[in-house]
Image (cartoon, helix red, strand yellow):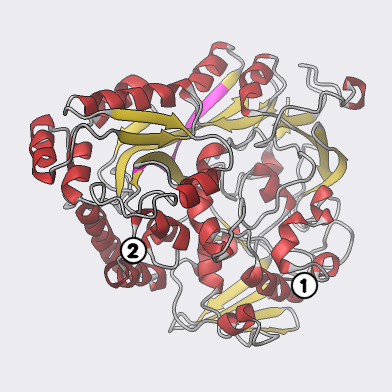
Amino acid sequence: MKRWMMTMLSVVMAAALLISCTSTPGTGQSPSPDASAKPGNSPSTGKASDGILRIGGGPQEKFQSSWSDYGGFVRTNLFRRLLMLDKDMQPVYKDLASDYTISDDQLTYTFTIRDGVKWHDGEPFTAEDVRWSIQAALKSVSINSVFAGAFSKIAGAKEFKAGTSNEVPGLSVQGNVLTVKLTEPVGAFLLTMAQWPPYPKHLLEKEDPLTLHLAAFWEKPIGNGPYKVTEVVPNNYAIMEVNPDFYGDKPQIEKIMLQTLSEDQTVTKAQAQELDYFSVMDLAQMNEIKKTGHYDIHEVDILYIRYLMANMQGSAESGKKNEKIADLRLRQALLYAIDRKTMAEQLYPGQATPIQTKVPNALPEFNKNTQPYNYDPEKAKQLLKESGYDVSVPLRLAYFYSDQATIDLIDTIKYYWEQLGLKVETTMLQGNLVELIYTKRDYDFIYAGLSAMAMEEVYGIFHSDNVAATGVMGNNKDAWDSAVDALRRESDPAKRQTALNKLQEMEAEYLWQMPLFAMKQYTVVNKNRLETAGIYGNEWTNYDRKIANWKMK
């Protein structure tokens, strides 16, 4: 990801919505295999069980780094974290850390690093690897916003990042113990340590942190997980094999083939039974895969939402604020005009659920007292009239998904808005999406999605430190920053809920983003070839899949 004249971090925070909603877990997020690659150079992909687990995730020229696009099956098994999530996204298991403590004031964390852990090249994994990796992460331009936010609160992090200090005094190592001292509590710190993987210092310490994610290291990365990369054919496939030095329970599946696939190859590969484990978000793909009769499909509720974002700052070309879009009454009218319940039932039956806030209604964190925007066309017409919007001026609705369900959804939204007497122009964005969405901004509303690690990620988009996103929606620092900071600091469940309640009420009050649906993810297992441990969570995360219990049939 790039940032041009502003901070790189803001793009990563805002562009998380692009990563999360344009990638497909298990398909490798990659283009079609290189046509020049010879089929004879690729391992056999026959249907009969040969002990090889076949999935997506194969590299293009390189593997993707693991601090921005941090999760998924491959990264979980290649790199380990200090802690491990359960399927409900709770950091309940110790992993690289054999123990940890938290001070009463929530400002000091100590992690005891497990003995006997080795990198795949045989070098020992140490507490110093973690300390160095956190320092490198502070200067990384390719890192998830939750990680960046958590690490920025380490004592001395600000000075280190600014280059006025060569060390971070809040990080110290004594033997196999890492101590982290914060300047203020970070509610998601344990979650961060269960999602963020340390890198091998001895292989990367000479790299510039700004370009660490582009290093040659990623051509054949060295991790410390139960599997190691043993063979790579770029734009074709890679092989992972059991790490004989792994400190935990050894997997029974000896070899994994990572195929470099584009999203549109998922169905054809599944029909040929050349995929054993993967996830899809596309309902049409899921239905086609179901027809084969070869797969068990597991529905998983995840924190993944679709919404419309208002561009109240106008296009970069005009340099003028989009005054009419900034009128709350217009945005309220447009949301009241959409029958989200019918759209979900018709376009995403069984997958989509209408939401009132960016916290899905089914989650316990949902604030039931938040102002609802249920379908009410008459109220929509009244609010539109009150806004004084000139209906002869077309509303410009942009989107960047290419699937048929999205095209139908955009057409349906256009229909509902036209019932108010509006003119609507729709455009599919293609090219550099970060630049088109956050720099050029040639639209009034954009249809987008977000897969979030934590609620801090959901609402951090409204904070003034997210320069890219507030460059689209505008900025009310006095209102939003204190409310978001209250959530970021809090780890107590009751106090976190209080902070979330306020944020959801503000969300409905400002309506900078108009919530549409929460979407289910589908985890797909080849029942003819693979037996898993029966644990299915968000495939974009690093939850414990109990890989040691998996077997090929």
What residue span does the magenta drawing correspond to? 296-308
Is residue 198 on the magenta stretch?
Answer: no
Label 1: how many Cα within 10 Å (few below 14, some 14–19, many 20+):
many
Viewer can see residue 546: yes
Mark earlier in primary sequence (1, 2): 1
Q: Picture coordinates of residue 514 (x, y %)?
A: 29, 44
What quarter of the picture does the C terminus occupy?
A: top right
Q: Position of residue 17 (x, y in %)?
A: 48, 47
Q: Amino acid at mark 1?
A: Thr
Residue 353 locus on image (x, y percent): 32, 34
Element under disc 1 = loop
**Relative horizontal placement of residue 355, taking residue 369 as reference (left or right):** right
Quick check: is 307 in the magenta stretch? yes
- Of 184 and 510, the residue lying toward us: 510
Q: Total of numbered circles in the picture?
A: 2
Determine which residue is flagged by label 2.
475
Check disc 1 and report the residue beneath it. Answer: 126
Question: What is the secondary structure assignment of the residue under circle 2?
Answer: loop
The picture quadrant where one finds residue 427 is: top left
Residue at position x 72%, y 27% in the image: 32
Which residue is painted at 13% across and 36% down in the image?
A: 380
Q: Is residue 394 above or below residue 492?
A: above
